[in-house]
Amino acid sequence: MTENNSTPLIRLSAAQLAAKLAAREVTAVEVVQAHLDRIAAVDGGERGVHAFLHVNAEEALAVAAEVDAIRAAGGAAAEELHELAGVPIAVKDLIVTIGQPTTAGSKILEGWHSPYDATVVQKLRAAKMPILGKTNLDEFAMGSSTEHSAFGPTRNPWDLDRIPGGSGGGSAAAVAAFEAPLALGTDTGGSIRQPGAVTGTVGVKPTYGGVSRYGAIAMASSLDQIGPVSRTVLDSALLHQVIGGHDPHDSTSLPDPLADLAAAARLGNVDGMKIGIIKELHGEGYQAGVENRFNESLELLRQAGAEIVEVSCPNFKYALGAYYLIMPSEASSNLAKFDGVRYGLRVLPEEPPLTIERVMGATRAAGFGDEVKRRVILGTYALSAGYYDAYYGSAQKVRTLIQRDFDAAFAKADVLISPTAPTTAFKLGEKLDDPLAMYLNDVATIPANMAGVPGLSLPGGLADEDGLPVGIQLLAPAREDARLYRVGAVLESLLEEKWGGPLLDSAPELTASPVVEPVETLVDAQEAK
Amino acid sequence: MAAINRDDVAHLARLAHIEMSAEELDRMAGELAVIVDAVKSVSEAAGDDVPATSHPIPLNNVFREDVVGHTFTAEQALSGAPDSDDNRFKVPAILDEA
């Protein structure tokens, strides 16, 4: 936002906070406390945002105090502090952390504490970024609305009766509600980008293998990717640089050196770049207000000197179907480990015999929610003898066709563009009883996961008919994540010039929840859940 | 491809170790039939000449040096277990002879 001395700390971007911290205009403890106060004011209660499943106040303040002490002492240690040291962050509760519970939004892991940190969490700790807490998600990241969380839904800060997207609705809502300047998400079919779109925030799915998946509880291993969530394109680039790079603990981690993504975001020009509109990812099936904002962004990029071309990806029409075979297949295998033996819930059957097999059946029946059960059954079906070739095998072939479509499109354009989601945020409960309608939210985001290419969603304005945020998606070839930040930052600045400030400045003011709970109470209550 | 029915779901639920009530089987069979119907066009999308892709960006022969790295202590490994005994995970009877 346009910053001045009276701007509250919670409304500053991560880059702005980093600059103030480096200049010693504020302390990291003040920054962390401001966000904890905000969480206490807007997250809990009957009509709270409910972005957080756990608040990590004590540790976050301790890390902040450590950063402040290093800065105050000066010398080499202060010089060596990471640019984002002291800038707080929220972490999706699918990513394991020492010292805080990790639930994956599931009853089956309620109360479980990981004995190790995910690689991305180790990197946050090395950069001395205080972790504010763990954010809500659809159970095991399975959903597009965060309504499939076993611990209750998250609300969209733009309209508390609407969904914040999913599965990473908690991370997106926390950032949109100014409860955190940054968050980590995971994206298997759009779980970073679609929540970004419907909450007016920025979310990036990096190139597959660009960020280590070690310590992200796996849903579909060939599709999952951890990525940044923020309010500005530059902030996502800065966070991407913290978490990216090779990790020997993840055999799918790319050995490539990480490009200077923040430099790409600061470059600020698209002159002569070719930007491709994907014919199959707009028009029919997309809400009019989404389409209007999309066309407006195209016009702005054209005026900035980009050449807009049209590309066709005819096999994208099979992407959703192929995804809903590959993802459940991999998920059914990955979730087999939740068996009531090594961690989490154990439920004993009511009647004998008390065999391990029956304990597993009773544990998984009680521990998994409906959507997880649906996907495990669907995956077991797609992988079963007699159906494997027709389902899983065919879906893997479609994956090849989608990659070929992307190859052909990137031969004609440097970057591709589409709406991130076909609609704006829908009402809580609206699609809960219709799994297929829920799946259609991911139609524009899934192709990137199938091909492993990077994607970014940024706010494109508000839809005329409902005044809710619309997301614009940019896609680049694998390993070319820098292009997303370059084009995204230009489009963001053109749009903000048009709006007279960031889109979130026009979001309704969140009032404190009726019962304002102090942070300590909130932590206890959330641990008790 | 055959449609999925209630008996299929019951069989799959057994394979996946998820106990299901009669009501749950009825509901799940209906929902899954709709989903399977929606995804079946996938089997007609690609010809025999199209190779399968299992990983989007395949890396081959990812090895590391054969040295002992970080390992959990027994205590750490058992820290989340529902039941343990003498540094081992403890489970109910494996065989049905209780």
Image (cartoon, coloured by chain):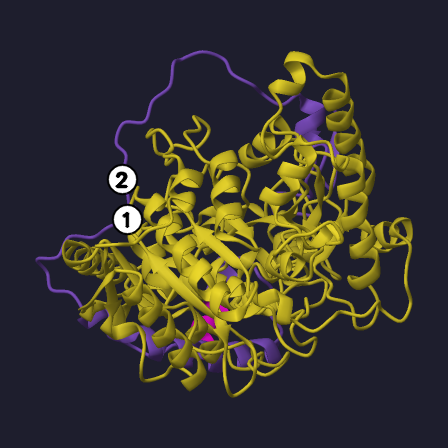
Chain colours: A yellow, B purple
What's the residue type where badge 1 is placed?
Answer: Ser
Examine the rendered structure and indicate whether residue A84 appears above or below residue A231. Answer: above
Looking at this view, is A483 or A60 the one in front?
Answer: A483
Name the spot of residue A95 as percent of width and height, x first.
59, 44
Q: Tell me which residue sits at (37%, 36%) in the image.
A: A252
Residue B89 shows in this picture: no
Q: Tell me which residue sits at (64%, 78%) in the image.
A: A428
Residue A128 is drawn in which quadrant?
Answer: top right
Foreground mark, 1 or 2, reads: 2
Q: Indicate the chain on which mark 2 is placed.
A: B
Q: Is residue B9 magenta?
A: yes
Name the spot of residue A179 as percent of width and height, x first.
71, 55
Magenta residues: mostly which secondary structure?
helix
Determine whether the residue tagged by mark 2 lies in a helix, strand or loop. Answer: loop
- Name the residue that disc number 1 marks: B54
In the image: residue A50, left or right of residue A299: right
Q: Indicate the chain on which mark 1 is placed.
A: B
Looking at this view, is A447 or B14 the one in front?
Answer: A447
What residue span does the magenta drawing correspond to? B6-11
Determine whether the residue tagged by mark 1 lies in a helix, strand or loop. Answer: loop
What's the residue type where badge 2 is placed?
Answer: Pro
Q: CA distance from mark 1 to mark 2?
A: 8 Å
In the image: residue A323, left or right of residue A212: left
Residue A16 shows in this picture: yes
Crowd class of label 2 (few under 14; some 14 to 19; many from 20; radius 10 Å): some
Q: Residue A404: which numbered mark, if any?
A: none
- Name the residue that disc number 2 marks: B58
Q: How many marks are shown on the rendered structure?
A: 2
Name the spot of residue A296 as percent of width and height, x first.
37, 75
Instruction: Tell me whether the residue at label 1 lies in contact with that at label 2, contact meaning CB atoms closer than 8 angstroms.
Output: yes
